[in-house]
Image (cartoon, rainbow, N blue to C red):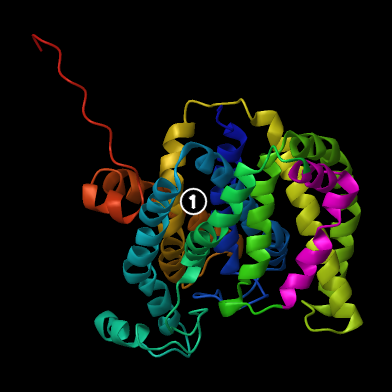
């Protein structure tokens, strides 16, 4: 089965976008963060708003698509074992080692409770009052994504395996044909909106993200879905040119509406429609790259996951030092962005990639055996 390089390329794009997104979070007006600049930026706030609504759904969609290909090549035991080593182990290691400095920095901000780091750790692992972690309480921070992927892999396995086994059954083929109709597939944003009324631990709704994860799996399960995405990508882009500005106008005038008022329901419907159309447009145009394999792709695929694990802590630590400087706001942003990306890549290349224990803890596949030396050398 030929590898889909578009999935790899889009996933790496999503990881790269995390750097400007989380660097901009230090300057936005929307929500608390572990470290905040005294003066916010309207420009960077809108950068956050225009990235936030779609890039995590894209990563879940791509993870679901990757699961389709993984299950076609692996037994259930192999699949679960790989998910345990690539997801659960890094989640635990990252929560214990990588995440706590973010909460400690939060306590060092004005109004916090400064103290020694070791003393803070005793509080971090005992305080579950705020899973966001922005007040210094225990949090999985950005690693919630890895935990959700691990859980989704396990609970989705029976359904996904059953679908693979029954792909040739007439009822399944008819269902696939129905769901792959453009007008039907686009309307899936309606149930996606409805599941957002369900519980969202720490502000991250698992039902919402599992729906998108399953959609990514489904989009690879039948050729009709690829044809539908290719057909719908340009109309989706045109629709976004209208729906995104309307949503931005509502966000600017009314704020981030929530609840069950008519205005809040309309706002959520519109936001979710934008998510769904963006996924269709990005994955549809991504199909043009399905056979494109740049020379750097293999390295990037291995580096992306460890870089994801360390990136936010690096941004928060660097950001804490930079926001204290009397510099232009956008200079601060640029320094945080560039230095955090360089530091995260350096951590991967100089330590994680080269040390076997760290490769294990960060979910990196075993290093290839060294080449045998030629005789006479």
Residue 320, picture quadrant = bottom left
Q: Is residue 326 left or right of residue 214?
A: left
Q: Locate residue 39, reporting x and y percent.
A: 62, 75
Q: Which quarter of the figure is the N terminus placed in?
A: top right
Q: Is residue 346 left or right of residue 244?
A: left
Q: Which residues are magenta?
A: 171-197
Secondary structure under the numbered disc 1 in the rendered image: helix
Q: Which quarter of the figure is the C terminus placed in?
A: top left
**Residue farthest to the left?**
376
* Residue 23 vs residue 204, the one in the foreground: 204
Is residue 325 in sight in this rendering? no
- Tell me: residue 148, above or below residue 288: below
Q: Locate residue 125, reporting x and y percent.
A: 34, 83
The reply to whether the magenta stretch includes residue 335 is: no
* Residue 256 vs residue 5, the one in the foreground: 5
Magenta span dominant secondary structure: helix
Is residue 277 in sight in this rendering? yes
* Residue 352 vs residue 155, the one in the foreground: 155
Q: How many marks?
A: 1
- Tell me: residue 8, above or below residue 336: above
| Residue name at image x 45 percent, y 80 percent | 106
| Residue name at image x 50 percent, y 74 percent | 35
- Tell me: residue 12, above or below residue 329: above
Q: Locate residue 193, reporting x and y percent.
A: 79, 68
Q: Is residue 365 left or right of residue 63?
A: left
The reply to whether the magenta stretch includes residue 188 is: yes
Residue 238, picture quadrant = top right
Q: Locate residue 41, reporting x and y percent.
A: 67, 68
Give the residue pinned by disc 1: 338
| Residue name at image x 41 percent, y 77 percent | 105
């Amino acid at each position: 089965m030929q590898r889909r390089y578009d999935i790899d390329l889009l996933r790496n794009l999503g990881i790269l976008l995390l750097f400007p997104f989380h660097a901009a979070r230090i300057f936005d007006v929307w929500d608390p963060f572990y470290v905040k600049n005294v003066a916010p930026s309207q420009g960077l706030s809108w950068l956050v708003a225009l990235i936030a609504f779609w890039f995590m759904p894209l990563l879940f969609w791509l993870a679901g698509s990757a699961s389709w290909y993984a299950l076609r090549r692996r037994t259930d035991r192999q699949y679960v074992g790989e998910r345990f080593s690539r997801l659960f182990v890094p989640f635990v290691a990252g929560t214990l080692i990588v995440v706590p400095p973010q909460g400690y920095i939060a306590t060092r901000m004005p109004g916090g409770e400064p103290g020694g780091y070791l003393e803070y750790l005793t509080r971090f692992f005992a305080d579950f009052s705020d899973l966001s972690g922005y007040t210094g309480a225990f949090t999985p921070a950005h690693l919630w994504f890895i935990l959700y992927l691990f859980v989704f892999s396990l609970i989705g396995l029976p359904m996904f395996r059953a679908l693979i086994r029954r792909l040739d059954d007439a009822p399944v083929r008819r269902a696939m044909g129905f769901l792959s109709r453009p007008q039907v597939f686009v309307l899936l944003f309606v149930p996606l909106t409805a599941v957002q009324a369900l519980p969202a631990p720490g502000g991250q709704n698992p039902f919402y993200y599992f729906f998108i994860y399953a959609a990514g799996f489904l989009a690879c399960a039948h050729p009709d879905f690829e044809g539908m995405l290719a057909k719908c990508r340009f109309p989706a882009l045109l629709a976004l040119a209208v729906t995104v500005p309307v949503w931005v106008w509502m966000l600017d005038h009314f704020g981030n509406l929530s609840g069950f008022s008519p205005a809040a329901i309309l706002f959520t419907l519109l936001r979710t429609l934008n998510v769904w159309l963006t996924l269709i447009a990005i994955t549809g145009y991504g199909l043009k790259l399905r056979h494109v394999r740049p020379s750097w792709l293999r390295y990037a695929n291995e580096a992306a996951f460890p870089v994801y694990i360390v990136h936010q802590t690096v941004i928060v630590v660097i950001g804490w030092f930079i926001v204290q400087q009397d510099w232009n706001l956008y200079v601060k942003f640029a320094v945080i962005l560039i230095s955090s990306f360089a530091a995260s890549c350096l951590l991967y290349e100089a330590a994680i990639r080269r040390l076997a224990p760290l490769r294990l803890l960060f979910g990196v596949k075993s290093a290839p055996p060294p080449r045998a030396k030629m005789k006479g050398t």
